[in-house]
Image: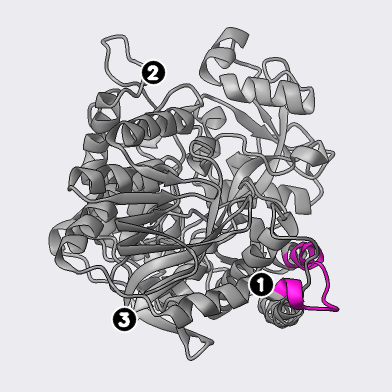
Amino acid sequence: MTTKFETHEHDVLIIGAGGAGLCAAIEALAQGASVGVVCKSLLGKAHTVMAEGGIAAAMANVDRADDWRTHFRDTMRGGKFLNNWRMAQLHAQEAPDRIRDLEQWGALFDRTSDGQILQRAFGGHTYKRLCHVGDRTGLEMIRTLQDRGVALGIDVYMECAVTRLLKDGDRVAGAFGYWREQGRFVVFKAKSVVLATGGIGKIYKITSNSWEYTADGMALAYEAGAELKDMEFVQFHPTGMVWPPGVQGILVTEAVRGEGGILRNKNGERFMEKYDPKRMELSTRDVVARAIYTEVREGRGSEHGGAFLDISQKPAEYVKKKLPSMYHQFLELADVDITKGPMEVGPTCHYVMGGVRVDPETAESTVSGLYAAGEVAAGLHGANRLGGNSLSDLLVFGRRAGMAAAQAAKKVRQATIDQTQVDKAEREMLAPFQNGNGESPYAIHRDLQETMQKLVGIFRVEADLQQALQELEKLQERARRMHVDGSRMFNPGWHLSYDLQSMLTISEAVTRSALARRESRGAHSRIDYPSLDATWGKQNNVVSSQKGTMMLRQEPVPAMPEELQKLLADEAEAVAGKGK
């Protein structure tokens, strides 16, 4: 291929430099591959940093009875048995070794009195299982992985956005993108591509996710012909900041509840007694989020439409030691001293369980040469993710994706990329400059967020979802005509015009999947179908592109081997919705 654009060649190209991307890069380098990592932002500014509470792994350092089987069972139970059982098994079995890798590479964990890694309680976990560094675990993880990757010699392309995957026949052969600062286009040629781009939070108005979370990876995979799975399952973290408005949605870690925080309504009632009397504040995220939402809806919410989370009953020094980030976050952003009074919190869009459909062993998508790991991939978490499982997810499957991508790259030649694909990708990116009378991407994005927040939020109903599809169609039409001014030099409106296309595609996938699933399960709650349904308990929604049209079908959840079924026998029937 003769191209007019700057071109880079690698065996393995990794898109995204969070925990999953860096784990994939480290492992691919260990396999002898030439590795390039492209990130939309700066190295070290990954969303993994926002994961505060800890990394779930059955180390049994605090609770000696813990083992991978219990972790597997908790993960399956939390996911309401829609999880890919093999992913849940590999994750539970391999997480402790991945923690040891981190430790060997220099991660500094909090310690028990006998020097082992300390573990804390978290919602949905039977035992104290979360390895942590105060409430800054994600930051320590990124620091460690970044140092390791840089020491090994990864090539990093920062502030570079990938807008299209390039193919050679049916196989992925590289990517097209642009430098965000100058707007210059760039082509990457690669034998394997790993997506590690995170989630979709910016399609919602209230989210804990930062500006990068615009569903890019899922849209890239979908446009390249890969299948998406379980897109209806969007997790609303129960505790985001609700006041002041400028910080709405910023995460309040589950570690606050893990360390003894209590939720109360405006009447001072500890309302979790009504919703989950056994686990109370340490119930799963879907249950706690719906509980707060219900309290607010029924008139018992806090002044600004949330609930009160209080840890001031603990000694001030304990709170500052265990939750230093939360202490400073509330003091600086909300002028609240959490050692003396409650925090005001409410649900915030936090994580998506759905994503690119992948093979559990290799993390390869349904398109040859394309891999996915971390939040962009589906399967491990089923209908609802347990806190702490995201960090061990990206350690386990980031490594597996890097290994498989590097091994596959050894067996294929460097592909040829058809120039017409590159020319088409360039035309798509320049179109907003050439649209004369279109509107600003900011207006369309605002309306998209309002639509998703209002119609495809925590509680869903058929009429709302149908209306959302109609609204999304109008927004897609508006997006085809949107216009941006100025040059390609650092132009935020232009960046958003691309991000918006990804967000609109994935919003449609979420809405269509939510409309199809006529039951309530995990993070998906239908007011018109409030119960579990046995039929839906045995199938996943799969989304694919057929000649430019979004198609949805159901596929049976893979059958589990007998020895694993025995671990789950009693509860599987209840959660599948037997007899309903």
* Residue 561 position in % (x across, y down): 16, 64
Tell me the amino acid under the disc marked 2: Asp
- Mark-to-mark CA distance, 1 and 3: 26 Å
Looking at the image, which residue is at 24% across and 45% down?
Answer: 29
Tell me the amino acid under the disc marked 1: Leu
Magenta-drawn stretch contains 434:
yes
Q: Front-most of 579 and 106?
A: 106
Q: Earlier in the sequence, mark 1 or mark 3?
A: 3
Which region shows up in magenta? 432-448
**Quadrant in which the N terminus appears:** bottom left
Secondary structure mostly seen in the magenta stretch: helix
User: Helix or strand or loop: what does disc 2 sit on?
Assistant: loop
Q: Which mark is residue 170?
A: 3
Q: Do the CB atoms of the residues marked 3 and 2 lie less than 8 Å apart?
A: no
Residue 253's image quarter?
A: top right
Tell me the amino acid under the disc marked 3: Asp
Q: Which mark is residue 110?
A: 2
Q: Which mark is residue 430?
A: 1
- Mark-to-mark CA distance, 3 and 2: 47 Å
* Residue 194 position in % (x across, y down): 35, 58
